[in-house]
Image: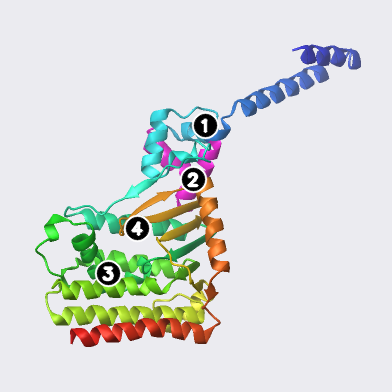
């Protein structure tokens, strides 16, 4: 207040007879003060929340229009909240977090000792599998629409994106997890049949695989990445879970084709659905062979300014967080793991061939057993 009075006194002395100029300068002063008041009272945490939220919305969608519809407010009300001029209520925060499937960690950044996770579960109901696969598809569409974007996948098990290229193999893995890992009661008396995969699920799996080929990715495999799948097929055969021998051999054949395809993609450092189109995504695939056993699947995603980590839980379920401390710690661990691993994409042809040949030999041995 004292500063304002001093300024007005100084103004009168400097322009004693120019009332028009005095009026203009006073208007400029009050406009500046009003602007500073609005700026200083903005909620920086709320503004940061909306900046991070923007990465969850495809570029072709207006975030303000989306928020206005979700919160049932005017477009102006949405913009005022995004600028921090109107305070976002707790109820509105919950609505937005639920709709965009984001963690409250976007708002609360005291993250050093705690992190919030979302949990994606394959449930025992008719629509459970469809909802599960569609949720993965939605995530992939969001990542694909982001810029920049990247996926780093430390694979304890075969990356699901490769498995989804092969509908019968994907169906077998889902059946096996539900039957032997999750102990879902409705599968107790069932045997695997390759014709049981619903067409809409197969279509969604194919879309996920296609999107993955368009996203720059790094994969880190260990020998157990392949061996765990062989053991699952072997267990299913020994336990009599296949409806017939032919189905078991079909799964072995698709597993072999999957490994052969990944080897070709690693050789070209490019992901593709059809080999003749490899040049379209040249340089978007890097692969490492790790000597260190990977105890879990770690999927580290960069989508715009946001980082997100997905962890496998109970084999098939996933839990995810955007907690910055947790993501940064995981990113540093992945970088360290890559430094200790051998790159087998583009170069190291001999090591790459040996790595995949070892897996193919084990498949041949299992096929001979089944026959």
Horizontal and vertical percent position of residue 309: 45, 54
Q: Circle 2 sits on which residue?
A: 323
CA distance separating discs 3 and 2: 31 Å
Question: Would residue 66 be counted in the magenta stretch?
Answer: yes
The C terminus lies in quadrant: bottom left
Q: Residue 341 vs residue 321: left or right?
A: right
Q: Earlier in the sequence, mark 1 or mark 4?
A: 1
Question: Would residue 65 be counted in the magenta stretch?
Answer: yes
CA distance separating discs 1 and 2: 26 Å
* Along the viewing direction, whichever of 336 and 52 lies nearer the viewer: 336
Q: Earlier in the sequence, mark 1 or mark 2?
A: 1
CA distance separating discs 1 and 4: 33 Å
CA distance separating discs 3 and 4: 14 Å
Q: Secondary structure at mark 4?
A: helix
Magenta residues, as a range?
Answer: 47-73
Q: Secondary structure at mark 3?
A: helix
Q: Secondary structure at mark 2?
A: loop
Q: Circle 3 sits on which residue?
A: 170
Discs 1, 2 touching: Cβ within 8 Å: no
Q: Secondary structure at mark 1?
A: helix
Q: Earlier in the sequence, mark 3 or mark 1?
A: 1
The N terminus lies in quadrant: top right
Q: Residue 99 vs residue 45: left or right?
A: left
Residue 94 vs 293, above or below: the answer is: above
Q: Main secondary structure of the magenta part?
A: helix
The image quadrant that residue 117 belongs to is: top left
Q: Circle 4 sits on which residue?
A: 136
Q: Residue visible at 52% across and 61% down?
A: 334
Q: Circle 1 sits on which residue?
A: 80
């Amino acid at each position: 207040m004292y500063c304002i009075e001093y300024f007005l006194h100084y103004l009168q002395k400097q322009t004693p007879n120019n009332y028009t100029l005095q009026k203009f300068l006073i208007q400029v002063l009050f406009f500046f003060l009003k602007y500073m008041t609005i700026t200083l009272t903005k909620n920086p945490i709320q503004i940061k929340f909306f900046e991070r939220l923007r990465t969850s919305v495809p570029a072709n969608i207006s975030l303000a229009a989306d928020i206005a519809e979700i919160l049932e407010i005017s477009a102006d009300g949405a913009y005022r909240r995004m600028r921090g001029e109107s305070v976002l209520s707790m109820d509105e925060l919950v609505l937005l977090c639920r709709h965009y499937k984001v963690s409250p960690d976007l708002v609360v950044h005291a993250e050093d000792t705690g992190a919030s996770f979302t949990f994606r579960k394959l449930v025992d109901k008719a629509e459970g599998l469809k909802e599960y696969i569609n949720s993965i598809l939605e995530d992939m569409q969001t990542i694909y629409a982001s810029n920049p974007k990247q996926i780093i996948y430390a694979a304890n098990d075969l990356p699901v994106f490769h498995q989804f290229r092969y509908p019968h193999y994907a169906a077998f893995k889902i059946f096996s997890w539900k039957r032997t890992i999750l102990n879902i009661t409705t599968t107790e008396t069932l045997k695997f049949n390759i014709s049981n995969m619903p067409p809409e699920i197969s279509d969604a799996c194919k879309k996920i695989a296609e999107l993955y080929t368009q996203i720059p990715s790094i994969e880190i495999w260990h020998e157990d990445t392949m061996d765990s799948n062989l053991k699952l097929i072997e267990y299913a055969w020994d336990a009599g879970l296949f409806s017939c021998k032919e189905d078991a051999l079909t799964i072995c054949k698709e597993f072999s084709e999957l490994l052969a395809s990944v080897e070709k993609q690693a050789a070209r450092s490019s992901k593709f659905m059809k080999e003749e189109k490899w040049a379209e995504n040249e340089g978007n695939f890097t692969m490492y062979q790790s000597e260190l056993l990977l105890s879990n699947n770690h999927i580290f995603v960069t989508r715009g300014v946001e980082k997100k980590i997905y962890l496998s839980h109970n084999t098939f379920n996933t839990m995810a967080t955007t907690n910055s401390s947790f993501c940064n710690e995981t990113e540093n661990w992945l970088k360290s793991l890559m430094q200790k691993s051998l790159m087998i994409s583009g170069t190291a042809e001999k090591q790459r061939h040996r790595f995949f040949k070892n897996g193919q030999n084990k498949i041949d041995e299992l096929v001979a057993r089944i026959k």
